[in-house]
Image (spheres, rainbow, N blue to C red):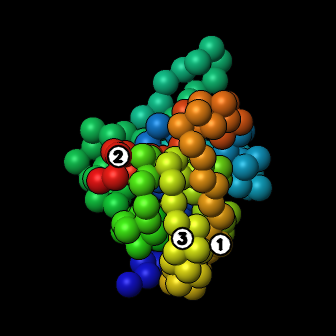
Amino acid sequence: MNVKLDSLITSQTRVKLLLKFFLNPESRSYLRELADEFGESTNSVRVELNRLSEAGLLTSFDEGRTKVYRANTSHPLFPEIHSMVRKFTGIDQLIPQVLSKLGDIHSAYIVGDYARGMDSGIIDLVLVGEADKAYLQNLIDKVEPMLHRKVRYLTLSEDELERYKPALKLEEAIELWSGKGE
């Protein structure tokens, strides 16, 4: 079932903020950065940041003269909103369909725009270990129409992961899978 978050929440700016902060709860950002990223006025972003902050869904803190926002992970509705955002982006469907029966996968991450909370229409997946690439491509071909998003993947060994960690920005990644052959 495809969740239509944008039909439930009519403010597109609010939807973008929920995706930004609840897809990856480690995400943090400030007003001007969000306005630039969304291509919207600082005023429209400020209004929605204030609404979400007043509702307790976002917390903020000062870094110098800049107010930085992030998801309030201790809010009672956090787990539900996080789950709803993951369903909206299709991540919940991606995990079981792509990672199970795939091979000797040690870990899997979503990197790029989705990890930063941006719905660009492309999901970048990094798999660490040995994957059956033909099987993986077959699964991706089946999942993409359901997700209405393109899935790109990269398979790396543990050594390659260490070497490419800075370029992949794993500190911003969403870990999907961890464990040897689980």
Q: Quadrant of residue 28?
A: top right
Q: Does residue 98 appear in the picture of this structure? A: yes
> Element type at marker 2?
loop
Residue 50: x and y, percent?
50, 44
Disc nearer the start of the sequence (2/3): 3
Look at label 2 and name its amino acid.
Answer: Lys
Nearer to us of marks 1 and 2 is: 2
- Left or right of 68 in this view: 168: right
- Left or right of 67 in this view: 101: left
Q: Which residue is mark 2?
A: 180
Q: Quadrant of residue 38?
A: bottom right
For the residues labelled 1 and 2, say whether their Cβ atoms are less than 8 Å apart.
Answer: no
Relative height, residue 170 to residue 11 (above, below): above
Q: Looking at the image, which residue is at 33% across and 40% down?
A: 73
Residue 129: x and y, percent?
50, 49
- Left or right of 123 in this view: 179: left
Q: Looking at the image, which residue is at 37% across and 55% down?
A: 82
Q: CA distance from mark 2 to mark 3?
A: 18 Å
Q: Residues within 10 Å of mark 3 (few under 14, many from 20)?
A: some
Q: Quadrant of the N terminus?
A: bottom left
Disc nearer the start of the sequence (1/3): 3
Nearer to us of marks 1 and 3 is: 3
Disc nearer the start of the sequence (1/2): 1
Q: Which residue is mark 1?
A: 150
Relative height, residue 29 to residue 117 (above, below): above
